[in-house]
Amino acid sequence: STEWGNGYQGPMFEGSLPEAVSHADGICLNSTVWLDDTLLTKEGKVVHLELVDIAKAMGKA
């Protein structure tokens, strides 16, 4: 699953974004995630070669 947050970040995150009037979180199951032209996860499974071993070590593969 992936967790997405949009909107206001509290000061504990020390971000550089301006304040927003609200914040919302959402969770998606079996996500396919791309970062630019690089596939990271496909239908909930880690597929990026540099991340597969890390996911296995965390019990997530």
Image (cartoon, rainbow, N blue to C red):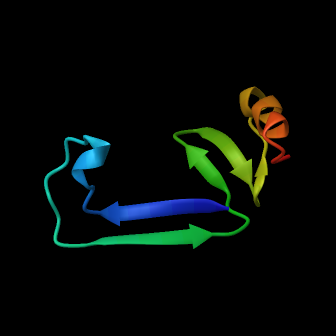
- Left or right: 8, with 45 as reference point: left
- Left or right: 22, with 3 as reference point: left
**Residue 34 rendering spot, x and y as whole percentages:** 59, 47
**Residue 5 rendering spot, x and y as whole percentages:** 41, 62
Q: Is residue 28 above or below residue 11?
A: below
Report how many numbered discs are placed on residues in the image.
0
Q: Which residue corresponds to the image point at 75% horizontal and 58% vertical from the top-left?
A: 44
When asked about the image quadrant of residue 52, the answer is top right
Q: Which residue corresponds to the image point at 25% horizontal and 42% vertical from the top-left?
A: 15
**As rendered, which of 59 and 1 lies closer to the eye?**
59
**Residue 16 rendering spot, x and y as whole percentages:** 19, 41
Q: Which residue corresponds to the image point at 25% horizontal and 40% vertical from the top-left?
A: 14
When asked about the image quadrant of residue 57, the answer is top right
Q: Which residue corresponds to the image point at 67% horizontal and 43% vertical from the top-left?
A: 39
**Residue 53 rendering spot, x and y as whole percentages:** 82, 30
Residue that lies at the very extreme toward the top in this rendered image: 50
- Left or right: 39, with 45 as reference point: left
The quarter of the picture where the N terminus appears is bottom right
Residue that lies at the very extreme toward the front in this rendered image: 12
Q: Is residue 52 above or below residue 6?
A: above
